[in-house]
Image: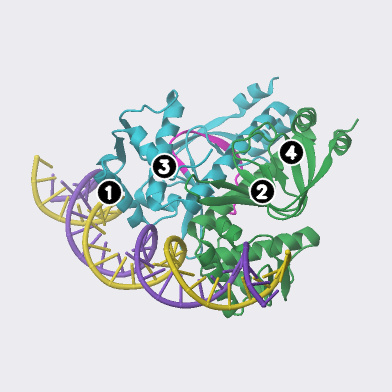
Chain colours: A green, B cyan, C purple, D yellow
Amino acid sequence: MDELAILEQAKSYRTVERGTMLAEAGEPLDHLSSVVSGCATMSRSFADGRRQMVGLLLPSDFIGRPGRAVSPYNIEAASEVTLCRFERRTFEQLMDRSPNIAHRMLVMTLDELDAARDWAVVLGRMSAREKVINFIVNLARREAAAHDGTVAEGPVQLHLPLSRETIADYLGLTIETTSRQFSALRRDGLIETPSAREVRIPDFARLALEIDDDDGGVIS
Amino acid sequence: MDELAILEQAKSYRTVERGTMLAEAGEPLDHLSSVVSGCATMSRSFADGRRQMVGLLLPSDFIGRPGRAVSPYNIEAASEVTLCRFERRTFEQLMDRSPNIAHRMLVMTLDELDAARDWAVVLGRMSAREKVINFIVNLARREAAAHDGTVAEGPVQLHLPLSRETIADYLGLTIETTSRQFSALRRDGLIETPSAREVRIPDFARLALEIDDDDGGVIS
DNA sequence: CGTTCACTTGAATCCGTTCAAATAGGGTGG
DNA sequence: CCACCCTATTTGAACGGATTCAAGTGAACG
């Protein structure tokens, strides 16, 4: 039997409500899954309360790693989340038998590695304003990619899956600074906020230009 | 013929002097290699001059990714570096034929992914002092791991493979702040600096405690 | 209509940066 | 071997962006 067909058969779906811990740092995680809908966060906390997200998990993203029982990060549902799950052992056995699946896992992991390193650049060298713009722009791009192709150059509207506090922990900022940056972007006419969780971007290209242009843009 | 034996045969060594660019961001990289000795840095630069390292490459670390011709980062020899190289195409063909090698690559990539995410936590949430301590402690641990096992709890001496400026770009700080933190640690008796490139740690456990203890330590 | 919780805004403070100058160390040529 | 130079590092002082602490606003819900 074809391995992909077996995978198809072994999968199960699970929907959890917002706030559910899908993994605790240091604790075993016996399912591998991919996000079908919703948004989850991956983070690490310090004993003194500081917290840093290391990734956002959006539809098509993978949770858990084959060959590793323990999750080094907390994974929490930031909204209602539906997962497509595989028992870890089953998945690992299939992977051992199918070079195809193993290869797909490597490609996926390499992509995550690039994303994690790009994230380090954002955290290490961007100003608060740039971080917030980068967050909004990437979310819009990610959402567009999920549907068809590129982001419209005109007005774009998007729903924020995270609270201000969670955005702050994602961007390595405080909640107040994050909020002030949203306000500043609003004053500058770069965004509108119909509600705290909705962002309308009148001119996407202009917003993206703030981080992609020659004065501060990332090379290559 | 056994794949590892073929790999053994396909490898070649190359030594480059300090400052050599091993890869340019956005440019093709037609060799995969592992660091035999020396130290290289992986970084991305902004058009305005800001730079952020996303990783240090020390002996046993791998450079380049199978299946990806282009390096997203600049890779530069921070000291004289000796590499053990494989032509990318050759390596990829071997990987396709050997689940063993493919599996090793996946494990390695997962380790790098953890390291990159941990790095994001350091950049996003640690103070300048914590970043510098973290740098020194990890370097000592890494060096100890290369030899036998754990770091001696007593005095430890180590050579810094990076200049202050490079350390600053690694830690997401300025050179001045980095230097001031070294001075502060010296004043506090946590380190001694026989020369700018040498650090002596009189009491390793005490230094490590500054970032691992209950007031600010990372949980799990 | 009042309560609650998330978000926003204000003011003061602090940490890290910036700009500037001093010091130290390493290598070179005399 | 010494004087000099060049560069890396350190230190000082002023500044600024992000944080902290505190109060205010607003929307959702009972």
Amino acid type at mark 2: Glu
C-beta proximity under 8 Å, tags 2 and 3: no
Picture quarter with the N terminus of chain A: top right
In the rendered structure, the answer to whether residue B101 lies left or right of residue A121 reads right
Residue B100 visible (yes or no): yes
- Magenta segment: B23-40
Which is in the foreground here, disc 2 or disc 1?
Answer: 2
Instruction: Report the Cα–Cα distance between label 4 and label 2.
Output: 15 Å
Q: Secondary structure at mark 3?
A: helix
Amino acid type at mark 1: Ser
- Residue B103: where, in percent of width, then height? 68, 30
Q: Are marks 2 and 1 on the same chain?
A: no
C-beta proximity under 8 Å, tags 4 and 2: no
Q: Are marks 4 and 3 on the same chain?
A: no
Q: Secondary structure at mark 2?
A: strand
C-beta proximity under 8 Å, tags 4 and 3: no
Q: Which residue is mark 4?
A: A32
Q: Earlier in the sequence, mark 4 or mark 2?
A: 4
Q: Quadrant of residue B116?
A: top right
- Residue B145: where, in percent of width, then height? 46, 28
Amino acid type at mark 4: Leu
Q: Secondary structure at mark 1?
A: helix
**Residue B211 has which mark?**
3
Q: Which residue is mark 1?
A: B183
In the rendered structure, the answer to whether residue A90 lies left or right of residue A172 reads right
Q: Considering depth in this image, is A102 or A78 the residue closer to the camera?
A: A78
